[in-house]
Image (cartoon, grey):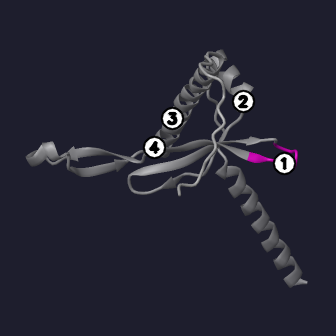
Amino acid sequence: MKNKYLITVCLTLFLITAITAQVLSTRNTEIELTEGNKTTLAEYNITDPETSEWSCDLDNCRFKMYQIMNEGTGNEYLYNLGTHKIARRYCTEVNESNQSSGECLTYVDYTQIELESAHDAITKTWLEKYSQTLRDRVSRVNNIEVLSNKTRITIKEIK
């Protein structure tokens, strides 16, 4: 009887821990874009992009941004929105005897809140630039001038 009770308690604790870890591992954030940028992204079904977990070394944290397309249809795929990086630390003391080399003597890590703020700023800036890029592409396609008819090319072997 005690074994069943112990197993039940252990399983319950494990489930609570697993659920808590999953909830805490996902950070939700809101990014405000102009109506034009938001509309342009929505035309390409980029409405709620996600970012991956961060992979950090001593200097930088990197993350991928993507949009899940056709979600819930069984035919999902990821639309890649690039890999991005955030500086993980900053220099607080430079070698004064050789300032031209830029040798840093002391680094300080950004706090988690500062990193999250930088993440949101980078994400917002990138989405704004990407929406402008999409508009520019459409503009170029709409302004194509045909200067020649199509050409069929035959490739022959040199003898």
Which quarter of the figure is the N terminus placed in?
bottom right
- Density class for disc 1 (Cα within 10 Å; few <14, some 14-19, many ≥20) is few
Please, what secondary structure does the residue beneath circle 4 have?
strand
Q: Nearer the viewer, residue 80 or 124?
A: 80
Disc 2 from disc 4: Cα separation: 26 Å
- Density class for disc 2 (Cα within 10 Å; few <14, some 14-19, many ≥20) is few
Kind of residue indicated by mark 2: Tyr
Q: Nearer the viewer, residue 38 or 108?
A: 38
Q: Which residue is mark 2?
A: 44
Please, what secondary structure does the residue beneath circle 3 have?
helix
Lateral position of residue 56 relative to residue 135, left or right: left
Asked where in the image residue 12 lies, by quadrant, the reply is bottom right
Kind of residue indicated by mark 1: Asn
Q: Position of residue 16 (x, y in %)?
A: 77, 61
The residue mark sitting in front, 3 or 1, is 1
**Which residue is pictured at 87% across the width and 50% down the height?**
74
Q: Which residue is mark 3?
A: 122
The reply to whether discs 4 and 1 touch (Cβ–Cβ < 8 Å) is no
